[in-house]
Amino acid sequence: MPLVPRPWSSDSDDFDDYDAFRPANLPEPGRFLDGHAVLTGREHAAFHRLTREQFEERTVYDVTFGYNLARLNLDTRHPDAGYRYAVDADEPSVLRAEFTPTTEFCPQSDTLATASFRAWNAEAVGPSHEFDLVRVRVAPMHEASDRINGRLAELEASYRNAGSVPDDEGDVRTTGADGVGTDRPSTPF
């Protein structure tokens, strides 16, 4: 049986450590975070460690790379990809999270951003964060960011109205090559 490294270990020179904050290996905060208190240093690292645990518990994995999505922030081969976080200037109990995918056409962006929203905002099954809501958006560099962010805004509004993450797996749909929505859900749970 082959040895499989823990998804959160820094087992090569290609990954930073979860306790490190290296801005050169992270995406620049985008317009969704403009005017808000962007987490840096220990605050960023602390929330990202908690993110690793929540993504592990909820199986938010990037299937292209075969690891927990939180590890993308540590992957030095993709220094402009991953999550950046900011405390909302108007609602300090809200955290904003902006996901920058590795490419402008990443086919998993919708699925990963939606799964992230669900993981951060679902009832705690493991370590929990201090925020009432984590808002998620995809960086505008992605070709479908307007469509994806519209769906995320709908999911967020549903969450705010219901007080819980909707459990309907069909609330987010994938788009086929012809641009028409398919009947397959794009989220893992």
Image (cartoon, helix red, strand yellow):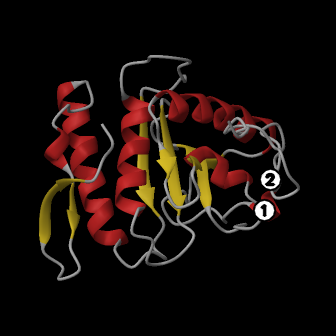
Identify the residue at horizontal 81%, vertical 47% (top origin): 21
Label total for image: 2
Rendered image quadrant of residue 6: top right
- Image coordinates of residue 119 in percent, x first then y, are 42, 34
Identify the residue at horizontal 77%, vertical 38% (top origin): 9
Disc 1: which residue: 76
Three-letter amino acid code at disc 2? Answer: Phe
Between residues 130 and 34, which one lies in front from this camera angle? 130
Three-letter amino acid code at disc 1? Answer: Thr
- Image coordinates of residue 4 in percent, x first then y, are 69, 39
Q: Are marks 2 and 1 in contact (CB under 8 Å)?
A: yes
Rendered image quadrant of residue 173: bottom left
Number of the label disc, if any, that sits on residue 179? none
Which type of secondary structure does the marked residue at label 1 adopt?
loop
- Image coordinates of residue 26 in percent, x first then y, are 71, 60
Which type of secondary structure does the marked residue at label 2 adopt?
loop
The residue furthest right is 13
Q: Earlier in the sequence, mark 2 or mark 1?
A: 2
- Residue 1 located left or right of residue 131: right
Disc 2 packing (10 Å; few <14; some 14–19; many ≥20)? some
Between residues 129 and 170, which one lies in front from this camera angle? 170
Disc 2: which residue: 15
- Residue 98 located left or right of residue 82: left
Q: Give above or below for 34 relative to 40.
A: below
* The N terminus lies in quadrant: top right
- In space, the residues marked 2 and 1 are separated at their CA atoms by 6 Å
* The C terminus lies in quadrant: top left
